[in-house]
């Protein structure tokens, strides 16, 4: 599943082809993904100029000069194909720029979404309104976490996946960041010390930043029809490594929390 770093990498890849470009043609090849495409999608985007791109949590944002922003979510299996040789049956939305580049949103499982949102009121849009701060942004601080987690009995791992506390963090990066910060994922969130939170914030930023960096190095692959988003499994310390020795020599364990697997080292993480 595409996580925040993959979405960020995707947005940066799209920016190369869309920033300050005019969208000459739009093809909407089916009525819906997880929900219906906006009825005015093709009409609004055709002839529009892209004035900037961005990301909020796992939503990619394409701002146009029509006061509307295209908001896309990659769901489980979505990715943008750039200049594909031919349009495939899973290329549900296809944009062609005035410069002649073709950008196809391919989503075989169709858990993704595409919306058009009034750019000025983006922060009020339901998918975005309740989100906590961006983990890579200035508002995500140890003090913010301390306030958000105070008195909470739920495990720290579970609350880090709560989008209202911090936006866009997925299972992989929560497991990895807790390992780096040496925090037991089972610990009650309200009982995690301030020094531990002081380690956790930079650990979260580091694991996300490294993944984005690794994705950035494969950006040129986006020009290939077969281009994959790229996951960075070889870099994981604990994620999906049950039974494998940790660098300390102890064995990585797996537990299930809130229906999701958590991998951790009981010796390194206290
Ligand atoms: Zn260890």
Image (tube, grey):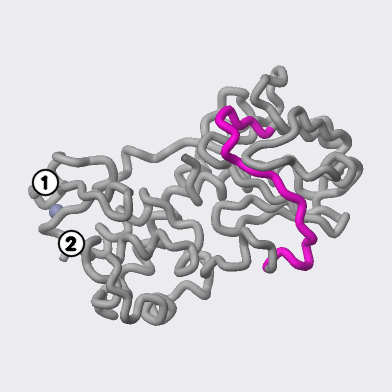
Q: Which residue is drawn at the image coordinates 55% and 52% (left, top)?
A: 58
Q: Tell me which numbered mark, 1 or 2, is placed earlier along the sequence.
A: 1
Residue shown at 50% from the left, 62% from the top? 167
Q: Is residue 148 left or right of residue 124?
A: left
Q: Which residues are magenta?
A: 105-123
Q: Residue at x 57, y 23 (%)?
A: 226
- State the image coordinates of residue 237 (x, y, percent, origin top left): 25, 47
Gap in Å between the C-alphas at discs 1 and 2?
12 Å
In the image, residue 154 above or below residue 225: below
Which dot marks residue 269? 2
Magenta-colored stretch includes residue 109 = yes
Residue 214 placement (x, y as % from top left): 45, 44
Q: Are marks 1 and 2 in contact (CB under 8 Å)?
A: no
- Crowding near pointer 1: few (<14 within 10 Å), some, many (20+)? some
Image coordinates for residue 175, horizontal then vertical, percent? 30, 54
Mark 2, secondary structure of its residue: loop
Rendering quadrant holding ligand 1 = bottom left
Q: Which mark is residue 251?
A: 1
């Amino acid at each position: 599943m595409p996580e925040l770093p993959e979405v960020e990498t995707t947005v940066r890849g799209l920016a190369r082809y869309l920033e300050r470009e005019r969208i000459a043609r739009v093809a909407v090849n089916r009525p819906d993904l997880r929900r219906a495409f906006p009825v005015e999608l093709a009409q609004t985007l055709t002839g529009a100029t892209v004035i900037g791109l961005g990301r909020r949590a796992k939503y990619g944002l394409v701002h146009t000069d029509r006061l509307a922003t295209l908001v896309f979510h990659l769901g489980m299996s979505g990715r943008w194909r750039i200049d594909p040789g031919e349009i495939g049956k899973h290329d549900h939305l296809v944009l062609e720029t005035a410069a002649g580049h073709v950008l196809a949103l391919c989503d075989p499982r169709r858990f993704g979404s595409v919306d058009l949102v009034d750019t000025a009121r983006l922060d009020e849009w339901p998918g975005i309104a309740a989100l906590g701060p961006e983990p890579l942004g200035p508002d995500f601080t140890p003090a913010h976490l301390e306030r958000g987690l105070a008195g909470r009995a739920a495990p720290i791992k579970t609350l880090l996946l709560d989008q209202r506390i911090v936006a866009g963090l997925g299972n992989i990066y929560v497991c990895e960041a807790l390992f780096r910060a040496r925090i037991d994922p089972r610990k009650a969130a309200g009982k995690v010390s301030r020094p531990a939170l002081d380690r956790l914030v930079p650990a979260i930023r580091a694991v996300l930043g490294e993944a984005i960096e690794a994705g950035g190095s494969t950006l040129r692959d986006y020009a290939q029809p077969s281009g994959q988003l790229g996951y960075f499994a070889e870099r994981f310390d604990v994620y999906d490594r049950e039974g494998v020795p940790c660098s300390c020599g102890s064995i990585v364990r797996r537990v299930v929390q809130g229906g999701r697997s958590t991998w951790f080292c009981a010796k390194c993480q206290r």
